[in-house]
Each structure stands twice: as C-alpha cells, then as structure tokens.
Amino acid sequence: MRTIAVIGAGQMGTGIAQTVAAHGMQVMLSDIDLATANGGKAKIETSVTKLVGRGKIEADQAEALLSRITPVGDYAPMEAADLIIEAATEREEIKNTIFERAGKVLGPDAIMASNTSSIPITRMANHSPDPERFIGLHFFNPVPVMGLIEVIPGLATASQTTDRVTGFAEGLGKQVVLSQDEPGFVVNRILLPMINEAVFVLGQSTAGIEDIDKGCRLGLNHPMGPLQLADFVGLDTCLDIIKVLYKTTRDSKYRPAPLLVKYVEAGWLGRKSGRGFYDYSGDAPVPTR
Ligand code: CAA
C-alpha cells in the first residue's frame, strides 16, 4: 500500500498518520474541516520535533516524514487512497456518516477500515460501499509506541481484505492479534471493565486516586495505573466503550460507574481537557481526590 487516508485528526488519527508516514507511505489527513486537519498535522510536528530533540530520529527524517502528510479539507482526494482508515469519535452515527460519504470516493480495489474500539464491524460495514472490503483495524495509544494492532474482520469481510490489512499492519512494525467481531474485541473487553471497576473503587472511597494507581503499577507491574490510563485514553472514550459493551451484551457487569458518567458530564475528560482524575495544569499531574 502506498497512499493511506486517515479520517479524524485527534489523538488516534494523528498517531496513525505519524506512524504510517514514518514507514514511507503518503498520508492524507482529514477532519471536520481543513483547519482542524492542519491542527492535527501541527500536533504531529510537535511530537516529531520532540523525537529529534531526544536524538531518536534525524532532522531530515522528520522533515521527510512531515512532507508525506497532507491535510485535506474534503474526501474527494481520497479516491487515490489504497486504504481509508476512519479514526473519528467513538459514536456509531458519526462513523456511519463518514463511511457513507467517504465510500463515494473509495477506489475499486481500496479498503475501508475503522479504528473503532468496540462498535461491531459487521453492523458498520453496511454503511460502506462494499462490506467485503470493510474491516476493523484497532490501534493502541500512543500509536507510534504501542506494538499491537487488532484486526477484526466482519461477517462479510473477504479473506483477501484481512490478509492485505494484516500485511499493512505488520509493515508498520506492529504485531497483529486477529479478533472475532465481538463487543470490545479482545483487549478493550478486558481493559474497560478494569478501568470501570477502578472508578467504582474510587467512588466507594475504598482508596484514593494515587493509591489505586500505585496498587496496579506496583502490584501488577502495569506501566500506568487504571485511572491514569483512563485520563490518557480520554474519559469520554472510556465511557463510550463501556456503554457499547453494556448495550450490546446487556450484561450488568459492564454498567458504567456513576462517577465516570459524572466526570464526563462535568467535561473532565482527562489529559486532553486538562483535568480528569488528575489535574494537568501544572508541571506534573496532581490527583484531584
Ligand atoms: N512518537 C514516537 N515515539 C514516542 C512518542 C511518539 N509520539 N511518544 C513517546 N515515544 C517513545 C519515546 O521516545 C520513548 O522511546 P525510548 O523508550 O526509545 O526512549 C518511549 O516512547 C517511551 O516514552 P517516554 O519515555 O516519554 O514515556 P514513558 O516511559 O513514561 O512511557 C507510555 C509512556 C509508553 C505511554 C507508557 O506509560 C505506557 O506504555 N502506558 C500504557 C499505555 C497503554 O496502555 N496504552 C493502551 C491504551 S488503550 C488503547 O489505546 C485502546 C483503546 O481503544 C482505548
């Protein structure tokens, strides 16, 4: 694959664009408008500049990487893409609208993929022009660093599509886990109940934020505690995923923790809003409870 389109220039979309461009492919990056797509490229520039500063990559490599990323204001240029990856907000109606609109320009051999964290692929495939060429391609945050991509074929996905997308993922230096199209796939089905339970533990005052995170860091050897990780992923995204698990399975074990709902209602979404379980306004994060 030579040209990849990424729809959504947020945390995941920019991480995907950076990684793809770092592996020599051309990237079109889009969002609701050109200004937002340009903003996404600016975030990638900041991230890549840090890598140069830390001696991880050379300045000319960074320049070449950035030159391969073109922000676009509409979907028309994506007719040249071999693969369109949707990485928009985790809301099914938003994603479906993207598949319908971008589907109009999808090339005859091109593949359309969703970076959804939990929404059924088989269901969304019906909004794309060809369910045989539609698949789930789930990246992990921070995309340039994390070694895993989940590949999720829907019921109608052709095996050739799965093979091509697996080859693409491996070409990015990632390892692939193939998952059936079940709610939360493999990793989020395990991760989100853990994060949600950590919020119940906090809500019941069993321990404070720092001790819950410390417990999991030191007791389980996780690089981040569950509340720190929730802030990192985004509390709105965590809530969206646990809601999908709850709605699709109707199993009460996935009911969202009331405190998680409250934080999202307050606009305390984690790192991206400057406050979640931690306050990020100073030099170092400070627990808020
Ligand atoms: N581009 C390229 N490299 C980057 C980077 C970027 N944007 N950001 C960081 N790195 C590199 C650094 O250069 C550094 O490389 P070296 O080890 O070679 O020096 C390495 O990544 C680690 O970075 P830092 O030293 O800055 O930070 P750290 O050691 O504290 O690690 C972390 C940060 C990798 C995020 C670590 O805390 C971690 O692994 N946390 C858990 C992350 C996780 O669980 N992610 C999954 C979330 S769930 C998800 O994404 C799925 C979903 O659907 C919700």
Image (cartoon, rainbow, N blue to C red):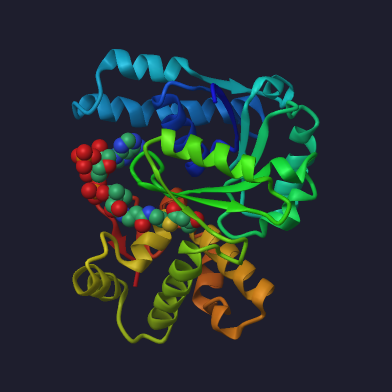
Q: Quadrant of the N terminus?
A: top right
Residue 118 x/y as whole percent:
59, 60
> Quick check: 274 left or right of 161?
left
Q: Between 84 and 181, which is closer to the camera in this rendering?
A: 181
* Residue drawn at (36%, 85%) of the image: 205
Above or below, 42 against 185 in this view is above
Snapshot quadrant of residue 5 = top right
| 202 relative to 106 in the view: left or right | left
Is residue 233 among what the camera can see? Answer: no
Q: Position of residue 268 (x, y in %)?
A: 49, 60
Q: Is residue 206 left or right of residue 5?
A: left
Q: Is residue 44 visible?
A: yes
Residue at the spot x=49%, y=61% of the render? 235
Residue in front for this viewpoint, 132 or 18: 132
- Answer above or below: position of 154 versus 247: above
How far across and how far down the image is residue 52, in percent? Answer: 25, 24
Where on the picture, by quarter, is residue 210? bottom left
Residue, x 73% and y 44% (percent of image)? Answer: 132
Q: Can you say which quadrant of the picture contains the C terminus?
A: bottom left
Residue 234: x and y, percent?
Answer: 48, 56
- Relative to 78, is 42 on the left or the right? left
